[in-house]
Image (cartoon, helix red, strand yellow):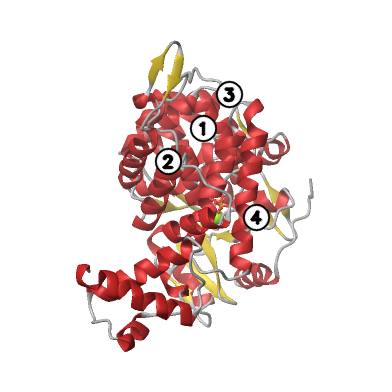
Amino acid sequence: MTMNIRIPENVQYLIDTLESHGFEAYAVGGCVRDGLMGAVPKDWDICTPARPQQTARLFAAHPMHNAGIQHGTVSVILDHQPYEITTYRVDGGYSDHRRPDAVSFVGSLREDLSRRDFTVNAMAYHPRRGLVDPFGGEADLRAKIIRCVGDADGRFREDALRVMRALRFAATLGFSIEPGTSEAIFRNQDLLRSIAAERIAAELSRLLTGDGVQAVLLDYAPVLGVVIPEINAMTGFEQNNRYHHLDVWRHTAAAVAAAAGRGPDDTVLRLAVLLHDIAKPSCYTETDGVGRFHGHQKAGAVMAGDILRRLRYDNRTVRAVTRLVLYHDAPIPSGGKGVKRWLNRLGEDLFRLLLEVKKADVQAHAPWCRAELLAELGRASDTLEEVMAQRQCFQLKDLAVNGRDLIALGVPEGAAIGGVLGQLMELVLDERLENERESLLEAARRVYARDGEGF
Ligand code: ATP
Ligand code: MG
C-alpha cells in the first residue's frame, strides 16, 4: 500500500492558506482512503477548526457554494472543481434514525473523526504531519474490512443510511464487513424504512456497480429485502429446469456480477439485471417436476416499474429498465434484418444495453448452455457494429426521404404522411427496398395510390 498520498496543488493551496491564518487543516475521509489504496480520489474534502464564515472570508476571491454552510461546509471552486471545507463538528442527537437534529462545532480533529461512519473513512492526512488515524482505519484498509467507528448498533441507530453505506463500500471496494458490524447491520436493518427513498436509491445504484457486488447480494439479501421486499421471494427459489443450476436469487447475483460496465449506462444495466427475474417466483408453474416461468417478463416489467418508482428513480431510468426487463428473454436474430428491427424498436443505446443484459443473464445460466447462447449474442453484437459502421437505415430519421418530399409528391399533410413513411420504413427494414431517394419516392407513390384513402 502506498503510504504517501499525493496531494494535488489546489488542495495544498487550501491547506496552506488556512494554516497561514492560524487554522490547522487536513484532507479527510474518502480521499484519504482512496489515496492510501493508490487510487485517484474523485474529490477532496478538507476539515479545519475554522468556522464557515472565517473560511468563506479567507477564500472570498474564489467562487464558492454556501448551500452547506449550516452544516459547517463551504465549497470553494478552484479550476471549476469544488473542494469542500468543513468545520470540525459532531452531530447532535438523532431522534429519528436519520439526519441529526443539530450539528455542533468542536475543537479537535479527533472528535470530528469519531462522528464518521467507518474506520476507513475516519482518517485525516496532512502533507507534513502525515496520517491521523485514531480508529485503526489503515489496518482495516489493509485487511479490506468495513468496521463502524465505535459501537456499531449505536451508529446504525443514529443514522440507518449507514446500513446501506456499509453494503455500498463493501461492494465498491470489494471489502468484507467485520463480524460485529455485520451482526449490527442485520439487527438494525428495519430502520432503513425511515430513510428517504432517494438516499437509499443513490447507495443502491453505487452498490450494484461495485466489483464486489455478488458477495454483498448473497450475504445481505435480507437487508436488501427491506429496501425491495420482492427480493425475499427470490432467495432460495429453485428453478427446477435444466437451463438453471442456481436458485433465482443466486442466478440474479451471478448475472449482476457478470454485467461488466460496458453499456452506455451502467446504472440502468445493473438495475435491469437485478430486476430481470423479479417476477419468476410469482409466475412459477411445474409440469412433471419441470419448472416454467411463463409470463415473467411482462409481470417483471410491471413489478420493476413499481419498485423503481417507489425508490424515486427518475422517469428515464424507470422506462429504460422496465423495457429491458420486458425484453430480456426475447429472441434476437443475429442477422441484419433482425438487428435493425430491434434498433428501430429500442434505439441504439437501449438495444446495446439489452444485449448486455442478455449476455449477463446467459453467463449465469447452467454451464452447458452458455457457450452457444453467448456465441449467438456475439453474432448479434457484430451485426450491430456493422449496421452502425455502414450507417444503415433503421429509423425514420435515417430514411432518404422525409415528410416534405411526400408533400411535394402530392400526399396531403396529416396522417397520410406518417402512414406512408411508416410503410417505407417497413420495406427498408425488411430489406425489400434500398434506402435510396428515387426508389423510395417511387414506392411512396405506389403506397399512397394503394392505401392513401385508408390513412
Ligand atoms: P465517495 O465520495 O467515494 O462516495 P466518501 O467516503 O467521500 O466516498 P461521502 O458520502 O462523500 O463518501 O462522505 C464523505 C465522508 O463523510 C465519508 O468518508 C465519511 O467520513 C463521512 N460520512 C458521510 N456520510 C456519513 C454518514 N452517513 N455517517 C457518518 N459519516 C459519514
Ligand atoms: Mg466523497
| Location of the N terminus (image quadrant) | top right
| Disc 2 residue: CB within 8 Å of ligand 1 | yes
User: Is disc 2 in contact with disc 3, using a CB cutoff of under 8 Å?
Assistant: no
Q: Which residue is mark 2?
A: 161
User: Is disc 4 in contact with disc 2, using a CB cutoff of under 8 Å?
Assistant: no
* Mark 1 or mark 4: whose residue is earlier in sequence: 1
* Mark 4 or mark 2: whose residue is earlier in sequence: 2
| Location of the C terminus (image quadrant) | bottom left
Q: Residues within 10 Å of mark 3 (few under 14, many from 20)?
A: few
Q: Quadrant of ligand 2?
A: bottom right
Residue type marked 4: Asp
* Mark 3 or mark 4: whose residue is earlier in sequence: 3
User: Is disc 1 in contact with disc 3, using a CB cutoff of under 8 Å?
Assistant: no
Name the element at disc 1.
helix
Name the element at disc 3.
helix
**210 sits left or right of 428 in the view:** right
Q: Real-space Cα distance between discs 2 and 3?
A: 19 Å
Q: Which residue is mark 1?
A: 252
**Residue 192, visible in the rendered structure:** yes
Q: Which of label 1 and label 4 is nearer to you?
A: 4
